[in-house]
Amino acid sequence: MTRTVFITGTSSGFGKAAAERFHDSGWNVVATLRNPDDWKAAPSDRLYVHPLDMTGPQGLGRVHVTLDGLAVDTAAPSATRRSPWSLAATSSALTFTWNH
């Protein structure tokens, strides 16, 4: 069974590197970034690129809809270091908390 990782802040830096590393290791990757058009990688059936702006609560609904039916094994919240969000993941759910 292929494992799935949810990563925020994948447009550059740690988030981008983590997404590429997990994908290269055979994981499904849910990669989120403010503008999905900024994602510059080859298409893959294990890669799900989605918009998420971690600077405000407006992005939350899109993520819940997007992840419906996809079991997430782990999360790498790289964007949350600079935003008022906290993110927790279990095998059955993602929980976002607005800390502002």
Image: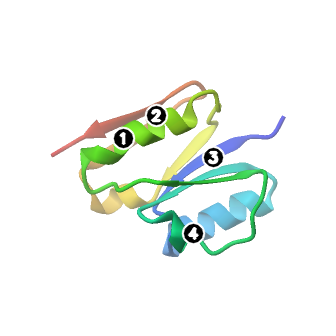
Q: Amino acid at mark 1?
A: Leu
Q: 44 above or below 69? A: below
Q: Pointer 3: what residue?
A: 5
Residue 10 visible to an observer of this rendering: no
Q: Are marks 1 and 2 in contact (CB under 8 Å)?
A: yes
Q: Quadrant of residue 82?
A: bottom left
Q: Nearer the viewer, mark 4 or mark 1?
A: 1
Q: Amino acid at mark 3?
A: Val
- Going from the N terminus, do you reach mark 4 or mark 2 first? 4
Q: Which mark is residue 60?
A: 1
Q: Amino acid at mark 4?
A: Lys
Q: CA distance from mark 4 to mark 1?
A: 20 Å
Q: Pointer 4: what residue?
A: 16
Q: Amino acid at mark 2?
A: His
Q: Residues within 10 Å of mark 1 (few under 14, many from 20)?
A: some
- Going from the N terminus, do you reach mark 3 or mark 1 first? 3
Residue 28 visible to an observer of this rendering: yes
Q: Pointer 2: what residue?
A: 64
Q: CA distance from mark 3 to mark 2?
A: 15 Å
Task: Give the SS element for disc 3.
Answer: strand
Q: Which mark is residue 49?
A: none
Q: CA distance from mark 4 to mark 2?
A: 21 Å
Left or right position of 75 against 47: left
Who's the residue at 63% across and 27% down the image? 69
The x and y percentages for residue 83 are 27, 57
Left or right position of 19 against 50: right
Task: Give the SS element for disc 1.
Answer: helix
- Going from the N terminus, do you reach mark 4 or mark 3 first? 3
The x and y percentages for residue 91 are 60, 28
